[in-house]
Amino acid sequence: MPLGMLAIFLQTIVFAYFLPLYLQHKGGGNVVANSVKFSLIPGLTVYSVMMFATAAKFLIEPVGQFVMYGTVFQFL
């Protein structure tokens, strides 16, 4: 659990650093909409690790159902 918390802490620092740079690059507009767009970048990375890498490492049956439930979880 400590390593998981460390990973979340480090990800938060990285995202907090890059979000203002991303918003500066966008040059205005709706900050909330631009922040949501930015969150898709790390979100898709985390999704791929949680769904596909996990399914590849462990014997999960049925895989399709695991991916479907995981996708709903990640979306929420």
Image (cartoon, rainbow, N blue to C red):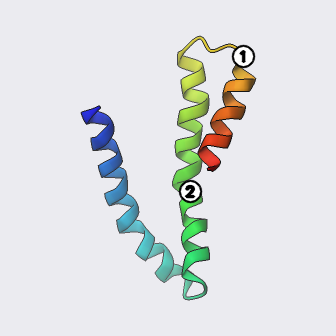
For disc 2, the marked residue is 41
The quadrant holding residue 47 is: top right
Q: Position of residue 1 (x, y in %)?
A: 29, 31
Judging depth in this view, the residue of 50 and 24 nearest the camera is 50
Q: Secondary structure at mark 2?
A: helix
Q: Is residue 10 above or below residue 67?
A: below
Residue 30 got which mark? none
- Name the spot of residue 46 as percent of width and height, x first: 52, 43
Marks 1 and 2, Cα distance to the nearest angstrom? 28 Å
Amino acid type, label 1? Pro
Q: Is the residue marked by circle 2 packed among few (<14), some (14-19), or many (20+) residues within 10 Å? A: few
- State the residue at coordinates (61%, 41%): 73
**Residue 23 place in picture, x, y as percent:** 49, 78
Left or right of residue 29: residue 1 = left
Q: Secondary structure at mark 1?
A: loop
Q: Can you identify the residue that label 1 sits on?
A: 62
Q: Amino acid at mark 2?
A: Ile
Looking at the image, residue 58 sits to the left or right of residue 66; the answer is: left
Q: Earlier in the sequence, mark 1 or mark 2?
A: 2
Residue in the image at 59% along x and 58% along y:
40
Name the residue at 28% across, 34% down.
3
When the figure is inspected, residue 10 is found, relative to residue 13, above or below; the finding is above
